[in-house]
Image (cartoon, rainbow, N blue to C red):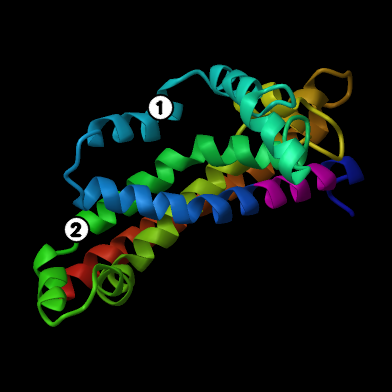
């Protein structure tokens, strides 16, 4: 273990697990929302845009409370999931992944949306005139061009999910080994005498992950711009 103790490693590994699943499960929805917002012209587009970006402006505690009301064991969605699938989200790491996914979703959609808007629609129209279906045009023309943007959005979402605190602690609390992620562990260590050193080590881990994600995202964004300019 060396530099960090078992509790700190436990929080880091749980954060990685939560962030991984939050990113993976939200990616298909992020792609669909970004494509609809970038290319779609339909009634309710502005409403969809507002709903996607709502977690950015809502206090995280409010988002967590709404999740608790909806996905708690007595909530309409949470009760249905428990009765039909045996899936419990509140006060479980799966709930932490859901909260992290919702808080990170706007960043993912924004990055993918910008990448799609940078693609010249004439390229897609040319493929469509050759008889390709809309799905095939997206898979063979749009997706390869925006791939770095998709990865950049996923990286940003992963970093945001790693650092999510307010909605997570409201929805799934701070249970060691189950829902205590890095931010929750930092908060817990700062509440007890002598916990400052452990908290500082986790702060360093959080800063390194966040900086690494930002640098990687920036590099990928530049690749998107170069690739599209070259096409």
- Report the quarter where the N terminus lies: bottom right
Q: Position of residue 9 (x, y in %)?
A: 83, 48
| In front: label 1 or label 2 | 1
Per the image, label 2 sits on a secondary structure element best described as loop
Q: 80 and 91: which one is in front?
A: 80
Residue at the disc numbered 1: 54
Disc on res. 126: none
Q: 149 and 215: which one is in front?
A: 149
Q: Position of residue 57 (x, y in %)?
A: 41, 22
Which comes sooner in the sequence, label 1 or label 2?
1
Q: Main secondary structure of the magenta part?
A: helix
Q: Residue at x 50, y 18 (%)?
A: 59
Q: Residue at x 75, y 37 (%)?
A: 82
How packed mark 2 is, by other alpha carbons closer than 10 Å (few <14, some 14-19, many 20 or more), is: some
Q: Position of residue 205 (x, y in %)?
A: 68, 45
Q: 51 and 180: which one is in front?
A: 51
Q: Quadrant of residue 70?
A: top right
Q: Are marks 1 and 2 in contact (CB under 8 Å)?
A: no
> Which residues are drawn in magenta?
9-18
Does 169 appear above or below 158?
above
Q: Is residue 90 left or right of residue 150?
A: right
Q: Is residue 10 left or right of residue 21?
A: right
Residue at the disc numbered 2: 118
Q: Is residue 212 left or right of residue 203?
A: left
- Report the quarter where the C terminus lies: bottom left
Separation (CA) of disc 1 from disc 2? 24 Å
Q: Residue at x 69, y 38 (%)?
A: 81
Q: Residue furthest bottom?
A: 130
């Amino acid at each position: 273990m060396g530099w960090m103790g078992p509790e700190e490693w436990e929080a880091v590994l749980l954060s990685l697990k939560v962030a991984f699943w939050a990113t993976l499960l939200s990616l298909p929805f992020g792609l669909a929302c970004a494509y609809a917002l970038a290319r779609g012209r339909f009634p309710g587009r502005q409403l969809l845009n507002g709903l996607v970006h709502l977690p950015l402006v809502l206090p995280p505690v409010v988002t967590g409370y709404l999740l608790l009301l909806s996905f708690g064991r007595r909530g309409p969605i949470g009760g249905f999931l428990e009765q039909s699938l045996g899936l419990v989200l509140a006060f479980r790491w799966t709930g932490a992944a859901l909260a992290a996914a919702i808080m990170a979703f706007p960043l993912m959609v924004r990055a993918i949306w910008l990448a799609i808007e940078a693609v010249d629609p004439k390229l897609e129209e040319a493929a469509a005139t050759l008889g390709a279906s809309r799905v095939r045009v997206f898979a063979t023309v749009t997706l390869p061009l925006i791939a770095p943007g998709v990865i950049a959005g996923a990286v940003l979402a992963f970093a945001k999910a790693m650092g999510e605190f307010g909605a997570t602690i409201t929805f799934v609390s701070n249970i060691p080994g189950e829902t205590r992620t890095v931010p929750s562990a930092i908060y817990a260590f700062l509440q007890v005498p002598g916990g400052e050193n452990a908290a500082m080590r986790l702060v360093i881990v959080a800063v390194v992950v966040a900086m690494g994600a930002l640098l990687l995202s920036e590099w990928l964004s530049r690749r998107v711009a170069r690739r599209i300019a070259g096409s």
